[in-house]
């Protein structure tokens, strides 16, 4: 009779331990499962992935249910094992503490090895598969234990609220971006993601953190047309320009009356049989599209796609013209420079024999970084001259040399208060490493 009772209790304990192991594996798998892969599988009709997404969407309830069931099972198994081992030790005439000690050792070993380490190790290696396999039973447990979980959540939230802590399971958008960026950086360090792909994925994430002012062509670098020029002069200027869309102004450069498309002009010239007399070129200009300087790049990209337009003029809060931005400027933030046969490779950057570069002051920091594969900061200044003025907190004079971000900046030329030419050295440690190698 006693032997049968012990056998039955042993089977029950074994079932409890198996159930606890499955719950342990489920907790690890569901918290480590790839949300991106689960959403993709759900779109393809995978019901298991759909259950996983439902569980992950309310992690607080899921984890609460798993912990309640897990601890209830482990405590029940430990009590039963303690009772059996204590009875066996008593029947052998051993002291009472021996049974307690043996039950503790046996259950700790079983729980640690077969309930914690083994199932969680498997769940870590095959998180997505384990999560999908166990999603059905876990969803059932969450529903059954729902009232208990809500009661526990209420107590937990009230307790944490006493210390000024507010619980929320909503994912911060910035945290999600950093998680993706961290994954890209990790896989790049492992050699799985190539450098070009890393820069491209990073560029996509950076769009939401940048404004059009960070990538626009400044008004001093814009090609513009005076609408009062003759048709012959306007045609010559369009042919000379490397751009197909050129703003036109009248009376003063700030008064932009339209944007002339080279294709429209050439079509009009062809219709006129090559005769320029009588052509109203300013009348061919299309209505300009003005966007604020602070427009987010991601929003501007969406606006370009919606309007099916590639060109916009940038104005500040007072309506003053600051520059222009194109669809190509935004795409270059993702894929890098897009050069065609009419583009000049980074105008204003000239490499010197000693490894330094002569840079026009109006060259953007981003263009210099791309041309030289440097990492100068561009958060506080758009141009190289602006970076030097920002760091020096003054307008330098020709001949002055500054050390910023481990680069030497030598002011070569200044016109009035505008720095027009600088010489910038490579990073000092790079130069030192090169000299040691030689």
Image (cartoon, grey):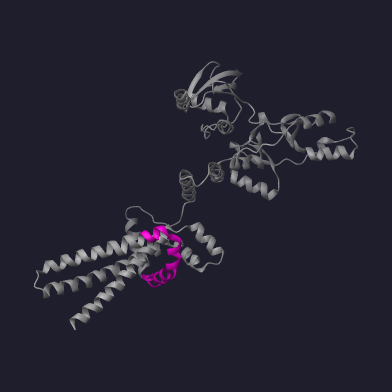
Please indicate whether residue 284 sits to the left or right of residue 355 in the image.
Answer: right
Asked whether 247 falls inside the magenta stretch, the response is no
* Residue depicted at 67% across the width and 29% down the height: 221
Where residue 271 appears, as percent x and y from the top left, is 89, 40
Q: How many marks?
A: 0
Where does the magenta region start and end? 121-147
Say if 93 sits above or below 358 in the image: below
Where residue 210 appears, as percent x and y from the top left, is 56, 41
Residue 410 in sight? yes
Where residue 25 appears, as percent x and y from the top left, is 37, 63
Say if 117 sits above or below 94 in the image: above
Image quadrant in which you'd find residue 323 = top right
Residue furthest to the front: 438
Where residue 227 appears, as percent x and y from the top left, is 79, 31
Which residue is at the front of the view, 43 or 21? 21
* Residue depicted at 25% across the width and 75% down the height: 10
Please indicate whether residue 28 sits to the left or right of residue 397 in the image.
Answer: left
> Secondary structure of the magenta portion, mostly?
helix
Residue 228 in sight? no
Residue furthest to the bottom: 1
Please indicate whether residue 221 sits to the left or right of residue 36 in the image.
Answer: right
Image quadrant in which you'd find residue 251 = top right
- Locate the N terminus by quadrant: bottom left
Asked whether 140 falls inside the magenta stretch, the response is yes
Say if 357 sits above or below 382 in the image: above
Residue furthest to the top: 399
Which residue is at the front of the view, 289 or 340? 340
């Amino acid at each position: 009779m006693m032997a049968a009772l012990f056998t039955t209790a042993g089977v029950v304990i074994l079932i409890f331990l198996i159930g606890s192991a499955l719950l342990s594996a489920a907790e690890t798998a569901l918290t480590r499962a790839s949300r991106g892969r689960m959403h993709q599988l759900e779109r393809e009709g995978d019901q298991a992935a759909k259950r996983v997404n439902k569980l992950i969407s309310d992690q607080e309830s899921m984890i609460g249910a798993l912990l309640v069931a897990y601890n209830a099972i482990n405590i029940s198994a430990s009590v039963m094992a303690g009772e059996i081992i204590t009875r066996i030790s008593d029947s052998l005439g051993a002291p009472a503490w021996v049974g307690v000690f043996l039950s503790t050792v046996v259950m700790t070993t079983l729980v640690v090895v077969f309930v914690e380490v083994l199932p969680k190790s498997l769940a870590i290696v095959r998180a997505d598969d384990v999560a999908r396999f166990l999603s059905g039973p876990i969803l059932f447990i969450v529903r059954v234990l729902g009232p208990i979980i809500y009661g526990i959540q209420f107590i937990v939230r009230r307790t944490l609220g006493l210390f000024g802590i507010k619980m929320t399971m909503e994912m911060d958008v910035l945290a999600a971006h950093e998680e993706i960026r961290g994954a890209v950086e990790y896989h790049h360090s492992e050699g799985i993601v190539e450098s070009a792909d890393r820069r491209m994925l990073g560029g996509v994430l950076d769009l939401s953190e940048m404004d059009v002012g960070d990538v626009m062509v400044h008004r001093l670098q814009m090609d513009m047309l005076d609408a009062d020029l003759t048709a012959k002069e306007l045609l010559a200027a369009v042919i000379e320009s490397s751009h197909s869309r050129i703003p036109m102004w009248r009376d003063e450069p700030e008064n932009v009356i339209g944007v002339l498309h080279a294709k429209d002009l050439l079509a009009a010239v062809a219709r006129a049989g090559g005769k320029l007399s009588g052509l109203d070129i300013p009348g061919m200009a299309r209505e300009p599209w003005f966007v604020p300087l602070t427009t987010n790049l991601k929003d501007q990209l969406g606006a370009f796609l919606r309007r099916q337009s590639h060109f916009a003029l940038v104005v500040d809060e007072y309506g003053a013209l600051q520059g222009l931005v194109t669809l190509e400027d935004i795409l270059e933030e993702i894929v890098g420079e897009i050069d065609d046969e009419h583009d000049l490779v980074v105008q204003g950057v000239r490499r010197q024999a000693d490894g330094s570069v002569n840079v026009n002051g109006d060259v953007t920091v981003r263009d210099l970084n791309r041309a030289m594969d440097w990492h100068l900061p561009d958060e506080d200044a758009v141009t190289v001259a602006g970076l030097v003025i920002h760091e020096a907190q003054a307008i330098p004079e020709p001949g002055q040399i500054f050390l910023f971000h481990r680069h030497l900046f030598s002011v070569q030329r200044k016109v009035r208060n505008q720095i027009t030419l600088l010489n910038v050295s490579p990073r000092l440690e790079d130069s030192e490493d090169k000299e040691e190698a030689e």
